[in-house]
Image: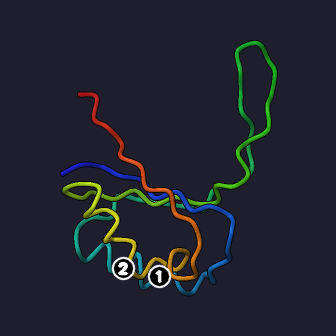
Amino acid sequence: MADFIFLMHNDVMAGDEAWEPYIRSLQQRGVFQGGSAIGDGVCARKDGVRLPVTRHIVGYIRITAGNLDEAIKLLAGNPHFEKDGTVEVRELPRTD
């Protein structure tokens, strides 16, 4: 199994109540590894220059799946995806 992250972009708004059933379904399948909305912050640099954060990413979900195609199938029921919002699906390569 590989680790993947779903990055929700800010192109739609899904109601908070819609997330609980979706997260519960991922948990029941044993693929949910965590997730959260993403709040404000900074891009920090050693030289002290603070750059603006990426504003189009508003939340993430971390899951496990056999491959990218299986990860994409797990978007079914994702409230953001179901409202035609953009969800970036990225593999998190293992470094161990």
The picture places residue 91, in percent across and down from the top left corner, at: 35, 46
The x and y percentages for residue 59 are 58, 60
Q: Secondary structure at mark 1?
A: helix
How is the protein colored in the picture?
rainbow
Q: Amino acid at mark 1?
A: Glu
Callout 2 secondary element: helix
Q: Is residue 81 left or right of residue 50?
A: left
Q: Which mark is residue 24?
A: 2
Q: Quadrant of residue 75?
A: bottom left
Q: Which mark is residue 63?
A: none
In percent of width and height, residue 94 lies at 27, 35
Which quadrant of the rendered structure holds the C terminus?
top left
Q: Residue at x 32, y 73 (%)?
A: 26
Residue at 41% x, 75% y: name it: 23
Q: Residues within 10 Å of mark 2 (few under 14, many from 20)?
A: few
The answer to whether residue 75 is above or below residue 18 is: above
Could you say which quadrant of the image residue 86 lies in?
A: bottom right
Determine whether, in the image, residue 28 is placed left or right of residue 76: left
The mark tally for this picture is 2
The residue shown at (64%, 55%) is 57
Q: Residue 39, position in %: x, y? A: 69, 55
Asked whether the beta carbons under mark 1 and mark 2 sit within 8 Å of each other, the answer is yes
Q: Which mark is residue 20?
A: 1
Q: Residue furthest top?
A: 47
Q: Which amino acid, by three-letter code, is at mark 2? A: Arg
Disc 1: CA contacts within 10 A as few (<14), some (14-19) or many (>=20)? few
Marks 1 and 2 sit apart, C-alpha to C-alpha, by: 6 Å
Identify the residue at horizontal 70%, vertical 45% (top origin).
Answer: 54
Q: Is residue 41 left or right of residue 81?
A: right
